[in-house]
Image (tube, helix red, strand yellow):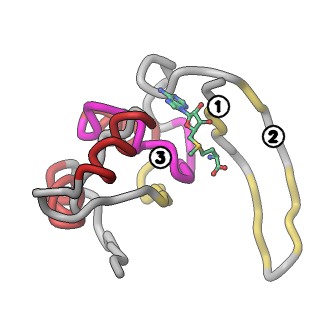
Amino acid sequence: NALAVLVQGVLVTGFSCLFLQVHFEVADATKREFPEGSFDVVYSRDTILHIDDKLALFKRFHSWLKPGGQVLITDYCCGEKPWTPQFQDYVKQRGYILYTPPQYGKVGPIINLKNTLIISP
Ligand SMILES: C[S@@+](CC[C@H](N)C(=O)[O-])C[C@H]1O[C@@H](n2cnc3c(N)ncnc32)[C@H](O)[C@@H]1O
């Protein structure tokens, strides 16, 4: 079940949240259309690992954002190849398309994302 959650008009102050407008929808993030400049924030947790063309997805995110909007994501990354056979099998079985942190780092500047932070163990 593909789940896309986009939240518009949410105020977060300290530990309290004031939800002004929340709309939940199941959709394919690579196909769902939104008008340009619709959102203050695009948030994704551990989902982009399923997306083949990550740059195209980030371009979509970028187009959905209002000026000054923010993209907040967490995602899985991988180490440089060669991988162990066990890890190769795991990635294949899960259907993941994984980038190394440097590959991910190249996406930010291409779509004019600023303040990109990549945390890697
Ligand atoms: C590892 S789970 C993470 C789920 C949730 N975000 C979390 O953090 O618990 C990956 C999720 O990505 C969703 N997903 C895969 N392809 C997607 C797509 N094209 N559009 C939207 N969601 C997708 C899957 O349905 C799955 O729920």
First reached walking from the N terminus: tag 1 or tag 2: 1
Mark 1 crowd level (few <14, some 14–19, many ≥20, 10 Å Cα): few
- Would residue 2 be seen by someone viewing this image from the given angle? yes
- Of the residues tagged 3 and 2, which is closer to the observer? 2
Quadrant where the C terminus sits is: bottom left
Q: Quadrant of ligand 1?
A: top right
Q: Which of the two residues, 42 or 28, is positioned nearer the viewer here?
A: 28
First reached walking from the N terminus: tag 1 or tag 3: 1
- What type is the residue that disc 1 sits on? Leu
- Residue 43 location, x and y as percent? 56, 51
> Could you tell me which residue is drawn at 14 percent across and 62 percent down?
80
First reached walking from the N terminus: tag 3 or tag 2: 2
Q: Which residue is mark 2?
A: 22
Give the magenta part as a residue range.
Answer: 38-55
Q: Which of the two residues, 92 or 68, is positioned nearer the viewer here?
A: 92
At mark 3, the secondary structure is strand
Is 50 left, or right, of 54 in this rendering?
A: right
At mark 2, the secondary structure is loop
Is 6 left, or right, of 61 in this rendering?
A: right
Quadrant of the image occupied by residue 62? top left
